């Protein structure tokens, strides 16, 4: 199984990943890198730019909000974007930010470590004049000391490590994966903190009723190994139900207010900072590219590729904005195919992420 994981990261020439078609954006097909949540870049109007070079993941976490991994029920395609194309788009966005120092955060709807040119991408992002920080989000499943040293040498400033328990058996259960080795992830994390300039922020996901005590153990482990050298050491997340996400058995849903109360209690109990704001990361408002289509607007598009979820297609506008935005078309009537031209109505446009339905 681990062999397959390595393969996902190393063979971008593959036509399929986990049985699903692999769309290599900019290789098989040209699609704008802005507009779709599953790949490319996302600019939410701050000096942080989200970077999504790959969509797939070798794990199948029982709580995954993006329904990633081999056990996915909703996904129908996966995406890969070459580093030079990502860098081109990030350069243009970073220019818009004026004098603001920019953070690029490689987060993805899957696992960034499966992106085989990740060190090259980090190095290229760091070479953009006002990009001061490159960070990434990971569950660390395929992290090794050799891989970590390459990421650090490329200039990775921070890893936001999703680690939801320190118990190996429970970790295999939570990650829905029998080969996942949390001890190995811990060992490499400790090595990173001892031997590199890369900082680590622990970002466990609290699943109330399932891993409450485990999250406290993660916090205590973080204190022992010295996380948060230059950034906050902890970014505890709370499980929220998502439409196509997975819902673990036995979860007790918690409101944001209850979660904050618990974090306050843990801050006092463990003596660490757990309640964070964007300012803790130097995140502030900054100019963003214009929204090109308003909600309710009718737009003529051409279908270009399968969407990342069932009943979805990726399309580009016909005409002058063809190269500017990707639009997801939700087609429950199964009437579309690649090459179809159709008029759609925009239903969502927040942060230049576009959803639409055929009219
Ligand atoms: S590692 Fe992340 S993307 Fe992958 S299955 Fe788990 S939660 Fe989902």
Image: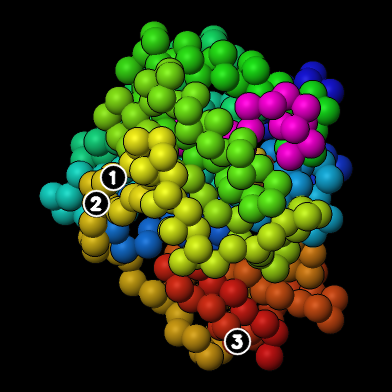
Q: Is residue 292 visible?
A: yes
Disc 3, disc 2: CB below 8 Å?
no
Across and down, in percent, residue 281 comes to 28, 45
Q: Which residues fall within the magenta stretch?
A: 159-174
Circle 3: element type:
strand
Residue named by callout 2: 279
Q: Is residue 116 left or right of residue 76?
A: left
Q: Is residue 254 above or below residue 54?
A: below
Q: Quadrant of ligand 1?
A: top right
Q: Residue at x 72, y 32 (%)?
A: 171
- At mark 1, the secondary structure is helix
What number is the disc on residue 281? 1
Q: Are marks 3 and 1 in contact (CB under 8 Å)?
A: no
Q: Residues within 10 Å of mark 1 (few under 14, many from 20)?
A: few
Seen from the viewer's position, the closer of residues 184 and 124 is 184
Q: Are marks 2 and 1 in contact (CB under 8 Å)?
A: yes
Color scheme of the displayed model: rainbow
- Whether ligand 1 has any atom under 8 Å from the Cβ at mark 3 is answered as no
Q: Residue at x 84, y 23 (%)?
A: 1
- Look at mark 3 in the image and give the residue it sits on: 345
């Amino acid at each position: 199984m681990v062999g397959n994981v390595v393969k996902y990261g190393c063979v971008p020439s593959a036509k399929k990943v986990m049985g699903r078609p692999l769309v290599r954006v900019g290789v098989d097909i040209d699609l704008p890198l802005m507009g779709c949540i599953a790949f490319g870049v996302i600019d939410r109007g701050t000096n942080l730019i989200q970077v999504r070079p790959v969509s797939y993941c070798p794990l199948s976490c029982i709580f995954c909000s993006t329904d990633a991994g081999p056990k996915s029920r909703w996904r129908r395609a996966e995406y890969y974007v070459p580093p030079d194309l990502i860098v081109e788009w990030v350069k243009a966005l970073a220019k818009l930010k004026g004098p603001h120092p920019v953070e690029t955060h490689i987060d993805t709807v899957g696992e960034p470590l499966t992106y085989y040119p990740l060190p090259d991408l980090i190095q290229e992002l760091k070479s953009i004049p006002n990009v001061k920080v490159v960070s990434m989000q990971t569950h660390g499943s395929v992290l090794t000391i050799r891989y970590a040293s390459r990421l650090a040498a490329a200039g990775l400033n921070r890893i936001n490590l999703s680690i939801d328990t320190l118990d190996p058996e429970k970790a295999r259960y939570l990650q829905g994966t029998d080969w996942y080795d949390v001890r190995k992830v811990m060992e490499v994390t400790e090595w990173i903190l001892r031997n590199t300039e890369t900082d680590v922020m622990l970002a466990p996901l609290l699943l109330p009723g399932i891993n409450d005590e485990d999250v406290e153990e993660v916090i205590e482990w973080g204190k022992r190994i010295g996380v948060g050298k230059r950034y906050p050491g902890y970014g505890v997340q709370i499980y929220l139900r998502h439409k196509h996400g997975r819902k673990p058995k036995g979860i007790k849903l918690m409101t944001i207010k209850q979660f904050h109360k618990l974090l306050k209690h843990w801050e006092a109990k463990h003596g660490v900072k757990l309640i964070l704001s964007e300012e803790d990361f130097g995140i502030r408002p900054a100019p963003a590219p214009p929204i090109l289509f308003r909600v309710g607007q009718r737009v003529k598009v051409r279908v270009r590729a399968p969407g990342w979820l069932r009943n979805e297609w990726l399309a580009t506008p016909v005409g002058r904005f063809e190269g500017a935005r990707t639009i997801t078309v939700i087609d429950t009537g199964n009437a579309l195919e690649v090459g179809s031209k159709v008029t759609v109505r925009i239903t969502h446009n927040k942060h230049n992420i576009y959803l639409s339905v055929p009219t």
